[in-house]
Image (cartoon, coloured by chain):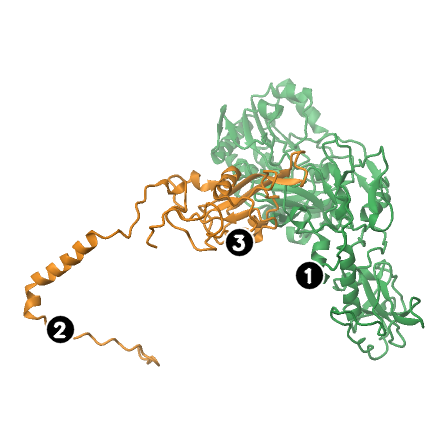
Amino acid sequence: MTAQTPNPTPQSPRKEQRTLTWAERLYLPEVLRGLRNTWRHLFRKPFTIDYDGTERASPLKYHTPRPGYRGEHYLKKDEDGHVKCVACFMCAAACPAECIHIEAAPTPPDWKDRERYPVRFEIDLLRCIYCGYCEEACPVDAIALSPTYNLCSVTREEKIYNCEKLLADGERYGLSLSTHRYRPDGVPGATPAAQGSAH
Amino acid sequence: MSTETPSAPAPAAPPAPLGPLPKPPLGPLPKPPPGLMTLRVNGKDHFIDPRKYRTLIEALHELGYPIPHFCYHPGLEPDGNCRMCCVNQRDVKTGQPLMTLNLANQPFTSYPKPVISCREPLDPRGMVIETETPEVIKGRQWVMEFFLINHPLDCPVCDKAGECALQDYSFLHGNADSRFQETKVEKAPKELSAPEQDYGIKLWTDRCILCSRCVRFLTEVSGTSELYIVKRGDRSEIDIAPGHWLNNPLMGNVVDICPVGALLDRRLIFTYRAWYFRITRSVCPACARGCNIIVDADKQCVRRLRPRENRDVNLWWMCDYGRHDFHYVNAKERVLLCRVDGAATTDIQGATRQVGARLKEFAQADPQSVAGLVSAWLTLEELHTFRQLFETLGSRQIGALAQPSTKDEVFPKFRIEADKNPNRAGLQLIFGADVEKNTAALIEGIQAGRIKALYLVSSMPHYTPPPELLEALKKLQYLVVQDILSGPLADAAHALLPGAAFAEKDGVFVNSRNRAQLLRRVIDPLGQGHDDLAVLQRVLQGAGAPDAKLLSAREVFRRMGATYPVLAGLTHRELGHKGLVLGK
């Protein structure tokens, strides 16, 4: 390179090799010192948690995400027990990953409060990027992102959530009627069970 | 609309005060060329022909000034009830705004009088118009505010959202929030068509802004006058006489011209969102008139047809027969696979090659033992390729099928043609005027055993073959059928090839007034990716035609000028969106 860099990054000077003392060159005292550390930690309470796989049923057992955490979606119900969604496609229109698939239909005659509801509401969580735009776009506050942070599954089909699954998730969080965002304090079911968590 | 006078006490939070009136334009109007008039818009002079335009708004739109409007529609008589299109006019001589007296104030004051541009006739002596003065802009904001007082603002659940004039103008001219504190007047939705009818119009009464376009359309264009406005003031609503239903073959147009989501097609309610549609300009295939349409497709599915303006063909309208005649495109009965030797196959290249070779075998034994039947639903390019095929085979036995005609339906400003075939004129252009009369002779030839092989290209969605034809087809040694829907013809075939519906192909239709119009591909061909033209070209290759190539419809049409003098020099690009009359 002929052109000189105006402000060259200073190279860190090579650390001078410290000559080891005679005791250090023996190695044995150092090994024993390390072993002492090992034994000390062996009798302490572990930092890791015993992950028994039941976490799907109670997602907040081990860890409570911070407010505003964007995990898996859920749908809310209204006072009559119907899905709050009116199938307006605003979430699907706002979705940058195009992972929300809705089919709208006229409501059954006994739904007095509105004329339109989703006969099919599917979220392809494999495509979802958890940006939360769907929640912001929703004009009736029907969809929200839950604190469920565990996003793994065994099959691909499991990750395509339909309306029933999303409503059941909402019931499980006890958030189905709430009109505010998820908050860990004050919302039933959202308090962490494992107090000993070291996080 | 009220106006703030200078003496009125200022409100607590005045919304953007009116600026001073702009300076009058300098200088007298320039003298126009003979026959024209001078129209000065926002200080710029235009010379226009006053006889060409019905009212001021048409001239302004043509000159590129986007005057907002709700009640005005170029195809209907101007009404001037919405007051959205108001502009300022100045006196030509003095340059002062036209004033009106405000009788509500003592002593009387006067203020600039806006003119309703959709009702204002053009003055051949010259006009000075201002479209973007503070008064005009303020006036639009007030009009929008009044419209939105009782509008339910249910855009998320309204099907019109995304293509709604009220929504668009609210973004452009409206306020972010409403000052209206009182309760909105609630009006229940009502069915305008008989509930037991499968197709009809539903009225969301509360969304209506009473522009009266639907009322005027049904009075002027269809002449049936089913709808009218009842009650007064903010309780006014569109209604239909008790015991009567909205039921005429043009009623679908009121859904298109409704500027809001008040009138909706019952078949389409809640099935679409306008912003997902891919829009393609095409031609309606349902009759010989060839109404210019827009095909709205979502992914690979045709969802809606609606008319587009062509003042030489269909004005702004189309009939409901054509509007709803697209469900066969994505129907379950579509022929998607080829069938040769009694087995269905996806190998369309092999199947077409085999069909071409078999036809050639028959032709080599006796050229007149091979016959062809085309339909009046094929484009010019396809018919031309079919003709090339039979020139290659050496046979002249070509007949044609067509869907039966009904009766003309005549309305005051619209006519639905009796001939239900989109390209009968094109068929006669390619094969001569008496091609359909050959069909009887062909059937006779088949019955007599003179004709042994037949290539039948139908692609007609509503064709019921006559029993004598079906009877004759049984006697054939080799029958090739190319069709879009499975039915008796497809069942009778020894070799079946998939056809393409109107939304899957490019091409040219010639309508009953000899106007060549462009049909455009909307979705990919469902039959193994081949439309009718590609299938015919592959059969032509299989029949051993020299220099037979796979060409696009555009290229085939360009080359057709050499064969047909009336098409000489024409290309798809030249036909454009509105078509051209042939031989002119």
Q: Amino acid at mark 2?
A: Arg
Host chain of mark 1:
B
Q: Amino acid at mark 1?
A: Ala
Q: Residue B232 appears at what percent x and percent y?
A: 87, 48
Q: Which mark is residue B42?
A: none
| Number of numbered discs visible in the structure rendering | 3
Q: Which image quadrant for residue B496? A: top right
User: Same chain for marks 1 and 3?
Assistant: no
Q: Could you tell me which residue is drawn at 58 percent across and 32 percent down?
A: B334
- Chain coloured green: B
Mark 3 sits on what residue? A133
**Labels 2 & 1 near each other (Cβ < 8 A):** no
Judged from the image, the secondary structure of the residue bearing numbered disc 1 is loop
Mark 2 sits on what residue? A18
Q: Residue B304 appears at what percent x and percent y?
A: 66, 42
Chain A tint as drawn: orange
Q: Is residue B236 left or right of residue B498?
A: right
Mark 1 sits on what residue? B176
Q: CA distance from mark 2 to mark 1?
A: 72 Å
Comparing B199 with B474, the one in front is B199
Q: Amino acid at mark 3?
A: Tyr
Judged from the image, the secondary structure of the residue bearing numbered disc 3 is helix
Host chain of mark 2:
A
